[in-house]
Amino acid sequence: MSVVDRQEWDVVVVGAGGAGLRAAIEARERGARTAVICKSLFGKAHTVMAEGGIAAAMGNVNSGDDWQVHFRDTMRGGKFLNQWRMAELHAQEAPARVWELETWGALFDRTEDGRISQRNFGGHEYPRLAHVGDRTGLELIRTLQQKIVALQQEDFAETGDYESRLKVFQECTVTRVLKDGDQVSGVFGYERESGRFFVLEAPAVVIATGGIGKSFKVTSNSWEYTGDGHALALLAGAPLLNMEFVQFHPTGMVWPPSVKGILVTESVRGDGGVLRNSEGKRFMFDYVPDVFKEKYAQSEEEADRWYDDPDHNRRPPELLPRDEVARAINAEVKAGRGSPHGGVFLDVSTRMPAEVIKRRLPSMYHQFKELADVDITAEPMEVGPTCHYVMGGIAVDSDSAAARGVPGLFAAGEVAGGMHGSNRLGGNSLSDLLVFGRRAGWHAADHALARTGARPHADDAQVDAAAAEALRPFSAEGEEPADGPPENPYTLHQELQQTMNDLVGIIRREHEMRQALEKLAELRARARRAGVEGHRQFNPGWHLALDLRNMLLVSECVARAALERTESRGGHTREDHAVMERAWRNVSLLCALTDPSGGLAATDAVRGQITLTRETTEPIRPDLLALFEKDELVKYLAEEELYE
Ligand code: FAD
């Protein structure tokens, strides 16, 4: 059929954010010829947008910090649904990953005695986030990019070719993972500029494509977050874990409408910012849940003293985990105590001198000045919840990052599930990218290099099918005349975003989620006729038509899992099941494709494309449970787990 360029590599990494680049560096350093593919320009991945910092228990600012405290905070934040072995590895290895970044050239902010500075963030007991002002992600990507260039220079010195062992294919989109029997055999993709198709054959593929936020209308996420990696894994036969858990960050911009959803970093609260309603009340004191009561201040005086004397006072409730703060803001607005544009007020202007605000929060200062004409050194910001992060993702082995059920497939970063349980703590993503990016690259290289017999082959029939799927939007009349006229992909995307925002958003109700599933079935049928005009060159409408398949798949996973979980926990709040149930603590929900051949058969709203199964989680190892007081465990764990 189509003429398709083919190349052979040992490891292919899909995604060039923090997780993908860290994986690629590791795989190349372990001797695997490694290709990296990304949708945007090299260095422009979503990780660049990360603001507040990287969480790692280095104990630079408070020597009481260590990996055990970090592990405890992460499990509490995730409401004990975390894949505990991932949380353990993450807490143990994050400091080494930060120090390693420094040896590769990262320039972190310093403490007065010259150590890497660490700031406070919600849910972290001690100041723990290594940072570069509020532009930490930029420094992280810059450093990893620099490391990649350094490796390419080494390769040039040895082979005369910069790209002989490590090559970046930028502005390319992968649409299918290819398989030889059960084994991964490579990926199929297209160049965004020319529309040309290509195949990279490899026995190991690492998926590091980030999140799914572009399925929601109000989001802090960039255009790349269309759930591609989640969908690629599903289509290749790997299940997704706990997709109901979607984090709504409490503080996104709410005004003007064109910038609604853009993130206001948690550092604003970490550095002393407070939340007030339209009556001027610091309302978070009314929203401290029982499980956190002993750890948070009961009065404004105590909360304010904590900034200078954290050892003898409890933390301000503005620094509760994100799910708690987002729900509180939602409740205040609903009760009629919101700000003029439907948010609440976040104030630093009365808490810090103007020059300190400009020094510690430079991006926020410019963001509000330029986008909203608000001077945050003189007046409060208006903020409200925004879809920010997906805790659910590809089900992986904790140690090796191998995707379940598909030999040769690995996943790391936001696209992987398990690490954060039902709610991620701020700063724990950047550290997750480094810890598990490295592990994915390591094990992918081992998998590829340990092969002895013939390499798995990307067979022509699969390549032709992938090409035909990608070309369908150019002949989108539908299979039958009765199917109706071609659909505009932009219209479909807008309807999808509205549906997810309104019906599977921050507060969920059974009848609304059922409605959402019906609407998703309708959109799915219409998306098969998503049509575009023109050619494959420079055609963003075509790109969106292809991304729709992925967004519809992951949205169905979110809606089905959210309907199934009849409790409220972390980033999943049910109005009709408002409490956290201990019986659900050890239940994970797995989404798999109903048609295991990887096809997308036409299916109705009730059956859909996704089959959901329940799975009992592995019991938490006793020495890790022993890090908690029994009184605390009683609040989360089921009777039999406690008894064991
Ligand atoms: P990304 O950095 O998003 O990279 C994904 C890559 O995959 C990109 O290169 C993309 O082009 C590529 N890709 C996607 N689909 C395809 C495809 N089909 N084919 C080829 N390539 C593809 N976390 C923290 O820990 N601390 C913070 O301070 C922080 N601040 C944040 C601020 C903002 C505004 C936002 C939105 C998030 C923040 N986060 C923060 C979260 C964190 O930035 C992300 O979770 C993290 O960067 C995800 O990294 P990743 O490597 O998994 O994916």
Image: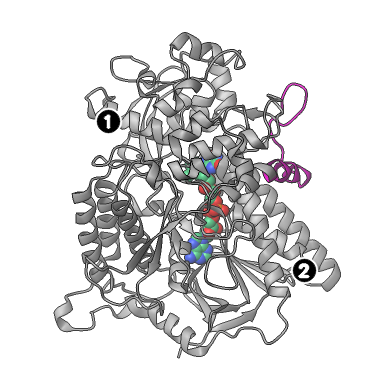
* Residue at the extreme left: 482
Q: Residue beneath label 2, please?
A: 31
Residue 488 lies in the magenta-colored region: no
* Residue at the extreme right: 158
Tag 2 secondary structure: loop
Report the amino acid beneath label 1: Gly
Q: Count every numbered label the image shows and give the total.
A: 2
Q: Residue 472 in the image: x percent, y percent?
A: 34, 79
Residue 35 position by quadrant: bottom right
Q: Is residue 290 left or right of residue 97?
A: left
Q: Are marks 1 and 2 in contact (CB under 8 Å)?
A: no
Quadrant where the N terminus lies? bottom left
Looking at the picture, does residue 319 appear above or below residue 176? above
Residue situated in front as seen by the camera: 391 or 492: 391
Q: Residue 52 in the image: x percent, y percent?
A: 56, 35
Residue at image coords 28%, 19%: 278
Looking at the picture, does residue 311 appear above or below residue 600? above
Tag 1 secondary structure: loop
Label 2 Cα neighbours within 10 Å, binned few <14 / some 14-19 / many ≥20: some
* Residue at the extreme top: 301
Report the amino acid beneath label 2: Gly
Query: Is disc 1's CB within 8 Å of ligand 1?
Result: no
Residue 112 lies in the magenta-colored region: yes
Residue situated in front as seen by the camera: 359 or 205: 205
Q: Residue 471 in the image: x percent, y percent?
A: 38, 79
Q: Is residue 130 visible?
A: no
Residue situated in front as seen by the camera: 22 or 369: 22
For residue 342, the mark is 1
Q: CA distance from mark 1 to mark 2?
A: 54 Å
Q: Which residues are magenta?
A: 93-116
Q: Residue 12 in the image: x percent, y percent?
A: 62, 70
